[in-house]
Image (cartoon, rainbow, N blue to C red):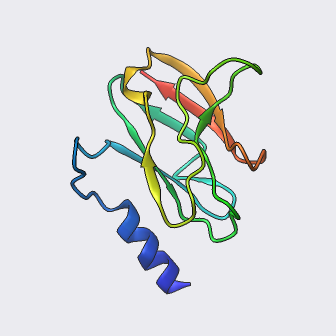
Amino acid sequence: MLASLVALATLVAPVPVAGGPVPEHTVVAFLRDYMPSSSIAIKQGESIRFVDGDPTAGPGHSFTENVPEGVTPRFDSDIVPMGTFKDVPNISSLPPGKYTFHCKIHEVLKGTLTVG
């Protein structure tokens, strides 16, 4: 367990990324939940790094906007395999408001993103 937590900490530690700055916020999927919370608040223009640290995730997790069928989500990490991360596209361009999100694979994973 300790080794898993140490490995997870190395994933979420800010590390320079080629091609752009490190996002201001990190959301981690761990044990079928979003951390630090399923209610996330950011300022307009900020971004999110999504980390899958869930060893029970199977193929992985996603951080995807809830939209009606046939509508393209404004943000979608796509499936992120366990032990990896992805900077969620288009978060920094969202206008202020509340956005609900979910995991494409595990319907129990869901939450709210508030952009202020």
Image quadrant where one finds the N terminus: bottom right
Task: Out of 98 and 66, give the one closest to the viewer.
Answer: 66
Up-down relation of residue 30 to residue 98 (above or below): below
Task: Out of 111 and 77, give the one closest to the viewer.
Answer: 77
Image quadrant where one finds the C terminus: top left
Instruction: Give the percent coordinates (x, y) of residue 2.
Output: 50, 85
Q: Residue at x 75, y 50 (%)?
A: 106
Q: Residue at x 36, y 70 (%)?
A: 10
- Give the quarter of the image for residue 69: top right
Numbered marks: total: 0
Instruction: Give the percent coordinates (x, y) of residue 64.
Output: 61, 36
Up-down relation of residue 2 to residue 47 (above or below): below
Instruction: Give the percent coordinates (x, y) of residue 45.
Output: 32, 25
From the viewer's perspective, tell me whether residue 88 is left or right of residue 44.
right
From the viewer's perspective, tell me whether residue 7 is left or right of residue 57.
left
From the viewer's perspective, tell me whether residue 77 is left or right of residue 49.
right
- Give the quarter of the image for residue 63: top right
Residue that protrudes farthest toward the bottom in the picture = 2
Task: Out of 62 and 39, give the one closest to the viewer.
Answer: 62
Q: Residue at x 63, y 71 (%)?
A: 55
Q: Residue at x 22, y 42 (%)?
A: 19
From the viewer's perspective, tell me whether residue 47 is left or right of residue 98.
left
